[in-house]
């Protein structure tokens, strides 16, 4: 039996594929490579290039590879972009997910794991936020994910598609072995931007909003190492296979750091006092989101390994250096070919 990983050439998906391959699982990746990279996929894992909403292609992959589980990462994820272009987000995140879920049902897939987001909570009243807290997104991105959650729950109940919905908090860091990491140019994630600035790849880091109702005026987030997040997916798949019921779970550590605290940590770990400038708030950003992680520990017996901000930053910094070297080598090889 095989696991289909949509978005498996992207940041989190590529880490997932490595973890599954190392565990001896059979894996096939579906990715349109709009933000992912074929070189980020674990060696020997087949890649199909296309959309997760292409039902003909998905059905073909399920039949040919005998797929019994789908782990669905493929999505657009930049909150301000979703405010500027909401229809694109509803198409890619919601419409494509609906097609994928329908294909899973019609083709007899047994298990489905969906990467959702803490953005479904909007600006939560109570912190830390629990899974049963009100879902009141403040961005099209959050709504696009919440709509998919609802569709998956309804389809699961009607067709016995057992599933786990994982609501990610702020994912950061990179593979400790430096095999893959966040590689998309122009990424907006704070730790990614901060380490790029520390390495001189950006001239400055902008802090969007310093007047939030938090201790230092900047947004607070619960940062989770990508490897611990992937471990939660592996645990979810194990529990589904063992007969566990469908569930919705927060993926976070249960404590948060402000934007200013993250910046200071990056400066300390990198040893670089880089340029930081203040800017107005961005639309769609919540002031404070921190997970209540009680349920994921209880339901999945999840045991994170990298719950330490300097470690997360250190892995992100190491990956950024490796990625810079990779790009330099690629550019050099291209220049040599051009001269030849």
Image (cartoon, grey):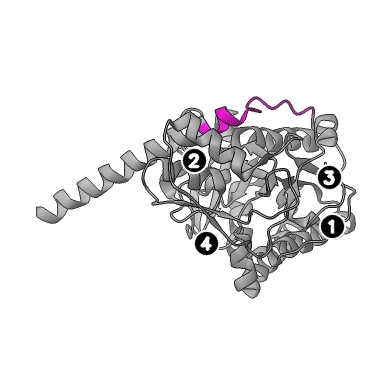
Q: Nearer the viewer, residue 313 or 115?
A: 313
Of callouts 4 and 2, which one flags the residue occurring earlier in the amino acid sequence? 4
- What residue sits right under mark 1 in the picture? 135
Please, what secondary structure does the residue beneath circle 1 have? loop
Residue 219, x across and y down, in percent: 68, 49
**How many callouts does the rendering have?**
4
* Mark 3 to mark 1 CA distance (whole Å): 10 Å
- Image depth: mark 4 or mark 1 in front: 1
- Image depth: mark 3 or mark 1 in front: 3
Q: Name the residue at 61% across, 45% down.
A: 259
- What residue sits right under mark 4 in the picture? 50
Please, what secondary structure does the residue beneath circle 2 have? loop
Marks 1,2: beta carbons within 8 A: no
Q: Is residue 275 visible?
A: yes
Q: Nearer the viewer, residue 151 or 186?
A: 186
Where is residue 22, by image quadrant?
top right
* Mark 4 to mark 3 CA distance (whole Å): 36 Å
Where is residue 148, by image quadrant?
bottom right
Marks 4,2: beta carbons within 8 A: no
For the N terminus, the image quarter is top right
- Image depth: mark 4 or mark 2 in front: 2
Left or right, 188 with reference to 274: right
- What residue sits right under mark 2 in the picture? 181
Numbered badge on residue 194: none
Check if residue 176 falls in the magenta segment. Answer: no
Please, what secondary structure does the residue beneath circle 4 have? loop
Of callouts 3 and 2, which one flags the residue occurring earlier in the amino acid sequence? 3
- What residue sits right under mark 3 in the picture? 129
Residue 13, x across and y down, in percent: 57, 45
Left or right, 189 with reference to 98: left
Residue 131, x across and y down, in percent: 86, 46
Which residues are drawn in magenta? Answer: 301-313
């Amino acid at each position: 039996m095989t696991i289909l990983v949509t978005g498996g050439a992207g940041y989190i998906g590529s880490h997932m594929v490595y973890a599954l391959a190392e565990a001896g699982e059979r894996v096939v990746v579906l990715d349109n490579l709009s933000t992912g990279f074929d070189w980020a996929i674990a060696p020997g894992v087949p890649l199909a290039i296309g959309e997760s909403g292409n039902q003909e292609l998905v059905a073909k992959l399920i039949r040919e590879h005998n797929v019994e589980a789908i782990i669905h990462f493929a999505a657009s994820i930049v909150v301000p972009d979703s405010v500027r272009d909401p229809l694109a987000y509803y198409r890619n995140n919601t419409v494509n997910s609906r097609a994928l879920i329908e294909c899973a049902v019609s083709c007899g897939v047994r298990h489905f794991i969906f990467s959702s987001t803490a953005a479904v909570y909007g600006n939560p009243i109570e912190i830390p936020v629990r899974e049963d807290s009100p879902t009141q997104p403040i961005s099209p991105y959050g709504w696009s994910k919440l709509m998919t959650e609802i569709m998956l729950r309804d389809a699961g109940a009607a067709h016995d598609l057992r599933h786990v919905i994982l609501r990610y908090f702020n994912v950061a860091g990179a593979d400790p072995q430096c095999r893959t990491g966040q590689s998309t140019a122009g990424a907006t994630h704070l730790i990614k931007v901060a380490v790029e600035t520390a390495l001189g790849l950006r001239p400055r880091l902008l802090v969007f909003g310093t007047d939030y109702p938090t201790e230092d005026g900047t947004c607070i987030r619960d940062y989770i190492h990508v490897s611990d997040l992937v471990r939660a997916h592996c645990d979810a798949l194990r529990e589904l296979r063992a007969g566990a019921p469908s569930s919705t779970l927060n993926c976070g550590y249960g404590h948060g750091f402000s934007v200013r605290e993250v910046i200071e940590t990056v400066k300390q770990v990198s040893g670089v006092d880089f340029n930081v400038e203040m800017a107005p708030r961005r639309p769609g950003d919540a002031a404070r989101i921190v997970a209540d992680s009680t349920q994921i520990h209880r339901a999945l017996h999840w045991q994170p390994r990298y719950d330490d901000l300097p470690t997360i930053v250190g892995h992100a910094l190491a990956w950024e250096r490796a990625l810079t070297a990779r790009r330099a080598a690629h550019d050099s090889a291209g220049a040599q070919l051009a001269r030849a």
